[in-house]
Image (cartoon, helix red, strand yellow):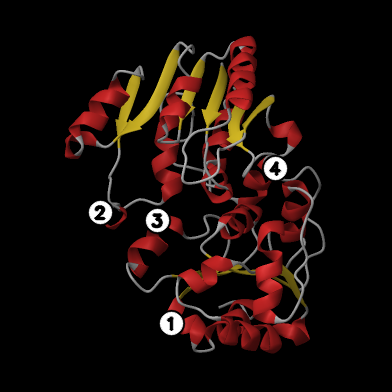
Amino acid sequence: MRILLVRLDGIGDAAVCIPLLASLRAAGHEIGVALTTRNADLFAPDAIVAQHVLERIPWPAHGSTPETTARARAEIAAARYDAALIASEEPEAYALAAGIPLRIGFSTGWTRPLKTLWVRARVTRAIARAQQPGAATLHEVEVLYRLGTGMVAAPQPPAAAAALRRMLAVTPVPPRSGILFQAGPKWGAIGVDAAPLRAALAALAPRGVRLVASPGDAAAVEAALGVAPETFANLREWVAAIDAAAQVVTVDTGAAHVAGMLGVPVIDVFPDAGFAAQVRRWRPWASRFAALRASEASGGGVARASEALADGG
């Protein structure tokens, strides 16, 4: 079959689909992806047959630009997909898949009856999922894997990084060294201010730290930390940088999930509130990791966790 995955979200949201995509490929299916400019080019070019990219309208507006939406719809129609796996909740995700014979998406059950009825009117198969993160007992990878029921051979999502990294990288595993430190506003948003970040960078410096940020965050990161972060022209360069690191330090962002699929150990920092549920749902999938509360990171926990992880802890 030729299958379209619709994932109109962020980098991490696309990365947690990798076990599903890897199993679909292993079952002999051809995979296309509908993405946004936020997560386009995440997947290795030889892992997919097509990529349809939409440019999102800046927040607080919703949806994508008319021009990119029209182009993506035309490309999808020309590709003649047999099935669509709709991993996003946005109405436009369902609209993109409207002409595909088999359409599989999530409903929230009767806790949100109007939305469930709306979804069921637009898919040929609806899969119920927990609406509240605290109620979920599964990792997000396991939830998304259910979209492929009947299309994959393995009942459980693969968790071997050696196989999963092929969805992200076209080259063998490189020599890995140093620590990639992903900086950005989400650190402050969860309660870790600049002072403990500067202390963590200083403590990790003897092992070689590569401070990185998205281009849009670079100026704010430099102002807060006093160091200009490295930025990348595209996601392919960023993925390669993560793949070359011995460790990644990040808040719960796309960097954690990409590193997890590549098999790179992760220091992953989560908000204190709902910590256990968030770790259960969003931990790096296929790599060793240390999960820290934001309060622990503020108290010097990043350097301690990094040393323990490097020692095999």
Q: Is residue 254 above or below residue 168?
A: below
Q: Tell whether 25 sits left or right of 96.
A: right
Give the secondary structure at mark 4: helix
User: Which of labels 4 and 3 is toward the front?
Assistant: 3
Q: Which residue is mark 3?
A: 281
Give the secondary structure at mark 3: helix
Question: Circle 2: is it few (<14), some (14-19), or many (20+) Cα within 10 Å?
Answer: few
Q: What is the spatial separation of the Cα atoms under label 2 and label 4, in whole angstroms? A: 32 Å
Q: Tell whether 251 sits left or right of 86.
A: right
Q: Earlier in the sequence, mark 2 or mark 3?
A: 2
User: Which of labels 1 and 2 is toward the front?
Assistant: 1
Q: Is residue 239 visible?
A: yes
Q: Earlier in the sequence, mark 4 or mark 3?
A: 4
Q: Earlier in the sequence, mark 2 or mark 4?
A: 2
Residue type, label 4:
Arg
Q: Which mark is residue 271?
A: none
Q: Which residue is mark 1?
A: 295
Question: Circle 1: is it few (<14), some (14-19), or many (20+) Cα within 10 Å?
Answer: some
